[in-house]
Amino acid sequence: MNGGARESGEAQANGPALNREILDAFGALVKQLAGIGQSIAVSFRVAPSDLLALVKLDGVLAMKELAQRMGCDASFVTAVADALERAGLAKREPSQRDRRVKNLVLTQEGIAAKERLMQELAERMPWCYALDDTERECFLGLLKKMLSSHGPSADSAPETASDSRDATVRSE
């Protein structure tokens, strides 16, 4: 066996272990990010979801569009808008084009809070202080590549042992 084929075989053999390490590291990163977000939210006296809304809000934004940007249901954005209004960070306004549509707009206090928030995030997110510019560009490129790939869907997930047992039970 030549060196290249041996390396390819070793890579395939190490694949599951490497994938597990990546999954563990990614899980740890997500947990760290959640902790940072929670801590920042406490310092701003809002819920983490309200912080996410501040990050996503730019200018005037329809509440439905904010829900899409946050990846949540539009009804949840109503609660977020309520909280942001109570905190004096945003206000609801009817759309100029369609009075049935409600826009969420940052107040002056909300704009200042968003600037403080973005500064805080830049200081505390691990890629901001642990990676140099080249590494951050590479990291962003890898994230975009993963997010844009269309891997296996949930419908094509491999059958598990419990799935095959369930199928056996159903067929009996």
Image: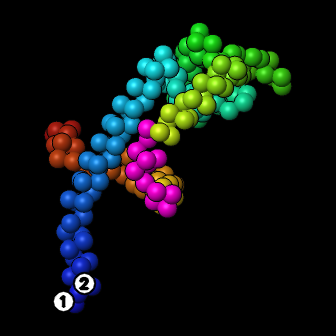
Tell me the chief SS of the magenta region: helix
Quadrant of res 17? bottom left
Quadrant of res 34? top left
Q: Position of residue 143 (x, y in %)?
A: 47, 53
Q: Residue at x 44, y 41 (%)?
A: 125
Per the image, the residue denoted by label 1 is 1
| Cα–Cα span, label 1 and label 2 | 6 Å
Question: What colouring method underlies this structural image?
Answer: rainbow
As drawn, is 8 to the left or to the right of 96? left
Q: Bounds of the magenta span? A: 124-135
Q: Is residue 120 visible?
A: yes
Q: Residue at x 69, y 15 (%)?
A: 91
Q: Is residue 141 above or below residue 41?
A: below
Query: Magenta stretch: residue 129 in it?
Result: yes
- Depth check, front residue: 42 or 16: 42
Amino acid type at circle 2 is Ala
Q: Residue at x 32, y 36 (%)?
A: 31
Quadrant of res 86? top right
Amino acid type at circle 1 is Met
Q: Is residue 78 visible?
A: no
Residue furthest to the right in view is 97
Q: Position of residue 18 (x, y in %)?
A: 24, 60
Per the image, the residue denoted by label 2 is 5
**Dot 1: what SS?**
loop
- The answer to whether mark 1 and mark 2 are in CB contact below 8 A is yes
